[in-house]
Every structure is written in C-alpha cells, then in structure tokens.
Image: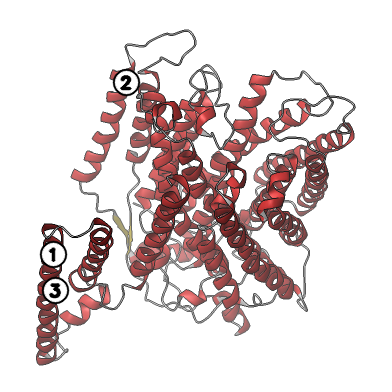
Amino acid sequence: MSTVAQKQGFLAVLWDYLTTVDHKKIAILYLISGGFFFLVGGIEAMIIRIQLAVPDNNFVSAGLYNEILTMHGTTMIFLAAMPLLFAFMNAVVPLQIGARDVAFPFLNSLGFWLFFFGGIFLNLSWFLGGAPDAGWTSYASLSITSEGHGIDFYVLGLQISGAGTLIAGINFLVTIINMRAPGMTYMRMPLFTWSTFVASALILFAFPPLTVGLFLMLFDRMFGANFFDVSMGGNTIIWEHLFWIFGHPEVYILILPAFGIFSEIFATFSRKRLFGYAAMVFATVLIGFLGFMVWAHHMFTVGLGPTANAIFAVATMAIAVPTGVKIFNWMLTMWGGSIVFTTPMLYAVAFIPSFTAGGVTGVMLASAAADYQYHDTYFVVAHFHYVIVGGVVLGLLAGTHFYWPKMFGTMLNEFLGKITFWLFLIGFHATFFVQHFLGLMGMPRRIWKFLDGQGLNLFNLISTIGAVFMAVAVLVLVYNIIITQIKNVRVGNDPWGDGRTLEWAIASPPPFYNFKQLPLVRGLDPYWIEKMEGNTKMTPAEPVGDIHMPNNSFIPFVMSLGLFIAAFGAMYQVDWRASDGESFVWAIPVLIIGLLITLGSMAVRSLKDDHGYHIHKEDLLKDDEGGRE
Amino acid sequence: MATQQSTSANPKVNYEYRRKKAAEEMRKHVTSFALMIFVTLIAFIMVLAGFDKTFVYPVLLALAALQVVLQLYYFMHMSHKGHGAAALFLYSGALVAFITILTFLTIVWW
C-alpha cells in the first residue's frame, strides 16, 4: 500500500469512508451526521417556536406538537450534541496525546455506525406512522400507553445508538490510559483530553442504567412484560430513577468536553498557560463523581420524602463548587494574557456569563422546596437551554471554528464566523432569557398552545424572534463551511499561530499515520515548550521505523445494519398496540435475519485474523521529500 | 502490565531474587486460599446452625465482599503495580452501583 494519495472517484471516496477505521475520518463522519441531526433538531425547534409565537396558534396539531417536542429533545441530546462532541474527541484526542490512532480502531468505526443506524431508525418514525410523543424522558406511565409505534422507535433506536456510544466511551478510556506518547503523564495531558477521559468514564457508568431501563421498556411494550405497569404489580417510578441515573451524568458527558474545548481556546488565545491546571483537573474529576449522586433532583416532586429530597438538594448544590473553580480559572487564564479575539475566543468569552447564568438557575432549582414552584415550567426550559446551548452548543461552535483547520486543512472565514457568533449569541439570549419569566408567570413546559390575555404573548413572541436569529446564524455557518471548502485554501500545521498542544505540531490534516516519529513530551503544552526554545518541530522519541496500521473494514457497517434490520422485526412482531390492529407475519423472520447478519459478521470478525499492514520506513522517508499530495 | 512482564523476563534480573519473589507470592496465594476456605466454612456453618436471619444476612454479605477482595488482590494481581486505573474504575463502579441500590432500597421499595 502506497502512502502517496491519489485522485479518487466519488465511489472510491464513499467506499473509503464506509470502511474507514482512521480516527480522523471517523471524526468527519461524526461531524457530518451529527451536523445533519443538529439541523433536523433545529428545524423541530423552529416549528415549536412558530407554534408558540402567537396565542392560540394552530400551526401544528397537538399530537404532532408532542412528537416534534419529543424528537427535538431526543435528537439534540443523543444524535446531535453527543456525536458532534465525539467528532472533536476523535479528531483531536489521539493527536493531543501523541498516538497514531485510538486503541481499537475497528470498535471506533463500529461505535459510529451503531450510532448512525440508531439515529436513522429513530428518525424513520416520522415516515412510519408517527414519532415518539412522550417527551425525551419518556416517563413510563405515559409511554407504555402511547399508541402506535413511536415509543418503540425511541426504545430500539436509542438502544442501538446507545451501544455505539458505550463502545466509543470505552475506546477513549483505553486510548487515553494506554496510548500516551513518551513523557505524556496524566498531569501533562491537555484539558480537552482530561475532560474526554472523565466524560468517557461517565459514559461507562451512565449508559448501562439507560440500557437496563430501555430493555425493561422494550419488554413492557413489545413482549407483554409489566415492569412499569402499576396495575400489574410493576413500579412506574423505577423508569424515572433508571432514566435519571443515566440522564444526569449525561448532561456532564455533554458539558465536560465542551469545558475542555474552552480550556484549550482560553489558553491558546490568551497566550498563557491555563491558570490552575491541577485545580481544573481535580474539578473535572470531582464534577464527574458528584454527577452520579444528584439524579433525584429531577424528581423532587415525585414524593421521595423530605430526607431524600434534602440529601439530593445538598449534593446538587455541591456541584456548583468545582464548576465555580473552573469559571474562575478561565477568567484568571485571560487575566494579564495577550488576548486575540478570534471567533473561537469570542465564543469562549461569551460562554462564561451565559453558562454561569444557567448554573445559577441550576442552584435555584436545586433547592427542593422552591423546585415545587419551578417544576415543569418554562423556568426549567430556560435553565437547561442556558447550560446546554450556552455551554455545549457554544462549545461545539467554538470547536468547529477552532479545530476546522486541523480536521480539513482549511480555515473558516473569520468575518462570517463573527457574524454567526453575534447572531447566535443575541438570538440565544433573546430566546431563552425571557423564558425564565414565562416560567415564573406559570407557563408550563411542553405545552402546545397558550391563550390570549394571560400576559404571555410578548415574551413568547420575543422568544420566537430570538430563535429566528439562531436559525440565520446556523445558515451563515453552513454557507461559511461551503465557501471555505470550495475555495480550499490550504493552511499549515499551526494556523492560529499560538497552538500549544501536540495536534498543532503536525500537518493539517495530519497524515493518516499521524506521527512519523512519536514525539517526546517534556511538559504541559509540549508544542509551546518547543516553540519557546526556538524549535519548529517536536523532539522525536523514537527513530523512524515501520508503522503498523489497521486494515479498513466493512464489517462494522454490516454489523450495525443487522441490528437496524432486526429492530424492525422486533418492533412489528406484536402489533397489539397499533390502532388498526394489523399484524405482520414477516416480522419474526426479519428479526432473525437481522440478528443473523450481526452475529454472522461478528463471527467473521472473530474467526478471520486481520493483522493489518506496515508502512515501511522507506515510504515514510519518501513522504518527507514532498511525495505526498 | 507490560512492564511487569518484561522485568520478570529480563535475564539481568537476579535469579535468586526472582525465586524469592515467587516464593513470597506462593505463600500469599496459599494463605489467602486457606482464608477463603475458612470464610466459606463460616458461611455454611452460620446457615446450618440456624442463626437469626437479621444476623445471618449482613454477615453473609460482608463475608462475600471479603471473598471478592481476596480474590481480586491475591489471585487477580490487583496488589501488583500498574493496576491503579483498573482499581479506580472498579471502585468507582462499585460506588455508583452501591448508591443506586441504596436509593432503590430506601426510597423506591420501602
């Protein structure tokens, strides 16, 4: 196999991406599909806001509104935010720790395709009789009585994509523990790697409860079990617990990598070492631990009793402490730095007040007694959009601008980037700030329409106008991406000029083997250290030698496709909930065929040895003489 | 783990030293094996003797936990160097599981 890139036709490129095990290409796949689902979720959000723009509106029907609202939440969390974070983790983390790939390249590909097919399955519900309609939390007493197949799509789709996420999380844990370059100790890892590490640990512990909950729901809905059916001796509260034991760590799975991206951006564009690095690491780990001890704060009004409520309230408030440590460390990183206001830095600076506002309302919601007032009002909606949009989405947009050159070798237009930023920031605050007051005025969340003369008109209209600003901002970003890729102006390894970590020490995009020689890491921000000593390159830790690479494989795609097919069989095998009472004889065979495809491809993978291949030293040296591209 | 294997296979490492280490390891194995048999005996006797259930259940659980710890440390090599990450994740997982079970026992089922 030659290392010299050749001009390829469209089909060859497509085949390459379908079979790739390269973390950089998988990152691009995550970015494209996560971006696609982000647009889908965004359209759903716009429909919600149009429906609520004026009182007593009839833009969508009540049933369709419930479906759109459910799918907006589910899509944004599971199919947009997480994959987009995985895109940056895949693109950057192996480079930041000086590795040639993740620990299990094959599993990396499998994780992506499972997520992808799960997401497609979930969204096919729109065309196959109606989407899930019990909210993204899908509380059991509501969802087991939901008619049609909507909830079945939710359960099976999330089960498949959740397996992919779990695989991806384990892969990053193993990668970060085992594949760090010589000298890259734990306390020299960049903050983005650290937050990926902690987020992956949270995935490892948080996704199994979701899997269990979904399995119980699956058996209740499709195989006649009664885990959640109170009239049959079940307990509907168990779903709520299982969901939130997963669901609360999930929000930290989302926000911690965003914290990591911002930490990199603050240090880079303040041209200073991150203030309080050790405290930042400690705070990240502490947030991870505390994240598992607070889930019942989503259930204060369930009636857990004052003791349980008090314990979970105090634990929740405790999380504000490590988060506050991080906020102050970012501000002190900027203090006295020589700051450059690039687009990523603008996002980072705007993130601090936006996220802090969301954090403060979080502490308000954490006091159990007051929560009885806030519960299920727009105040809660405002709170979690302030942390998720003001934290995670700003982080994703910042990361898109910051890491775009490393992923694609081109630089997004800064002027358009700043337009996106301002439109998005203004739109975001206009949309969600007024929702605090709507909530305090008593507007319930998930409501289809509100009536005139209740004082809710003005703020709802402002909120919708804000949403239009955000939509325009996203369109400008898409336009920016398209013209940037058409112009295709190539950039060097360190286009921001102030890169501190290892990923900026190699070409953009990096060669498929990443590092010809593994770098020697001599401290925190290793590339910065070399720059300060006048070196243009990292000091190598090994002589040039053969590099062992994994072969591409189509098996992950087939394995995931099998589960996708099997899910249809599982869903239609008993159709006793369908309103028209249809039954399908093909369902069981389809279930079996799907599972056979998955098990068969697993068998092929296990029985057929795939030792990969070597890039020879001579070819590597040839690359140096400009043989590449 | 990789470093552990390479040092023990290193011919430069003193043969006598390695022998002594192996003997120590063996002694620990045998001791903990005997201890585990003893603990199992206690468990059986407790049940056979028909003690009060409120006494037997917690003691049985405690003995089971002891068995797991002995197994992990003396037979699955967690006492060796380089198992810090595994231990951290094991204990974190156990903690999360414990909190979950505790919550279910205290506020869901009772």
B50, A52: nearer the viewer: B50
Q: Quadrant of residue A469?
A: top right
Mark yes or no: residue A289 visible.
Answer: yes
Mark 1 residue element: helix
Q: Could you say which disc has been placed on residue B22 in the image?
A: none
Would residue A261 appear left or right of A156 to someone viewing this image?
A: right
Give the letter of the chain under mark 1.
B
Image marks 2 and 1: residues in contact by CB distance under 8 Å: no
Specify the amino acid type for callout 3.
Answer: Leu
Mark 3 residue element: helix
Residue designated by label 1: B40
Image marks 1 and 3: residues in contact by CB distance under 8 Å: no
Specify the amino acid type for callout 2.
Answer: Val
A591, A361: nearer the viewer: A361
Q: Residue B91 location, x and y as percent?
A: 37, 66
Residue designated by label 3: B35
Do pointers 2 and 1 mark residues of a single chain? no
Residue designated by label 2: A590
Give the letter of the chain under mark 3.
B
A402, A463: nearer the viewer: A463
